[in-house]
Amino acid sequence: MKIDDLYYQNVQATTGYNSNASKAAAVDKAAQEQNKDAVNAVDKKNSQANTDRVEFSKDTKVTNKMSDAERASLVQSLKADLDNQMARFTNMMTQMFQKQGITGVSAQGDDMWRRIASGNFTVDAQTKAEAQQAISEDGYWGVKQTSQRIFDFAYALAGDNPEKMKEMQAAVEKGFEEATKSWGKSLPSISQETHSAIGDLFDSYYEKAGVSK
């Protein structure tokens, strides 16, 4: 998988969850009360696997000095975690669409993302609760974790080489451009905030490395 695709997956997934939460915000007061119960259920959920729901893991942090083997291991770990989260997300969305009689939506192309962007579907309280948790400040798809995860990919692949880091940042920019095309319009605010946060992480790296952008 190309590095552009890895960044693209991060950006796409972030936009998808944000649309869920935005659409769900339109429910009436009765649904909001139901959602409170769902949030409590999420907080108290047991460890039993549920393939129709997304589980959110904590992200791996990059250390300052790593060997080539450690970097390769980190990349594989980050990719495996992302692939797992993406599989759970697309499975959840596909099943939700099917339950609502929405067919012909493929998770492999742009169909799913454009459907999510359209907002032409409803979200149950449980899905809303998990989406809100996922895009929260410390959630897996929130600004903090997503921006750090993308930067971690870049850092691990670049091997702490400033020039390669610039190439990685260019790949990030391309990823956001491609995600915008798939989304079909301007990306949601959470994605734009993530984009900005990634830029800040790169700026901080360049400053500490004593190099210009």
Image: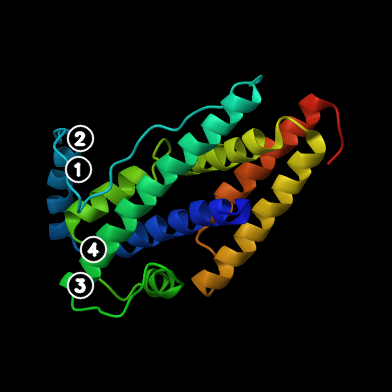
Q: In the figure, residue 109 lies in which quadrant?
A: bottom left
Which is nearer the eye, 203 or 35?
203
- State which tag comes first along the sequence, 1 or 4: 1
Contact between labelled residues 4 and 3, with CB atoms less than 8 Å apart: no
- Image colouring: rainbow
Q: Residue drawn 15% across and 58% down?
A: 31
Is 128 displayed left or right of 154 in the figure?
left
Q: Which dot marks residue 43?
A: 2
User: Residue beneath label 1, please?
Assistant: 39
- State which tag comes first along the sequence, 1 or 3: 1
Is 9 displayed left or right of 30 in the figure?
right
Which is nearer the eye, 22 or 191?
191
Contact between labelled residues 3 and 1, with CB atoms less than 8 Å apart: no
Element on which disc 1 rests = helix
Q: Which dot marks residue 98?
A: 3
Contact between labelled residues 3 and 2, with CB atoms less than 8 Å apart: no
Contact between labelled residues 1 and 2, with CB atoms less than 8 Å apart: yes
Tell me how far mark 2 sits from mark 1, CA to CA.
Answer: 6 Å
Element on which disc 3 rests = helix
Label 1 packing within 10 angstroms: few (<14), some (14-19), many (20+): some
- State which tag comes first along the sequence, 2 or 3: 2
User: Residue beneath label 4, please?
Assistant: 123
> Could you tell me the amino acid type at mark 1?
Val
Tell me how far mark 1 sits from mark 4, CA to CA.
Answer: 14 Å
Label 4 packing within 10 angstroms: few (<14), some (14-19), many (20+): many
Is 187 displayed left or right of 128 in the figure?
right
Tell me how far mark 2 sits from mark 4, CA to CA.
Answer: 19 Å
Q: Where is residue 181 in the image (x, y as percent from the top left)?
A: 57, 72
> Could you tell me the amino acid type at mark 3?
Gln
- State which tag comes first along the sequence, 2 or 4: 2
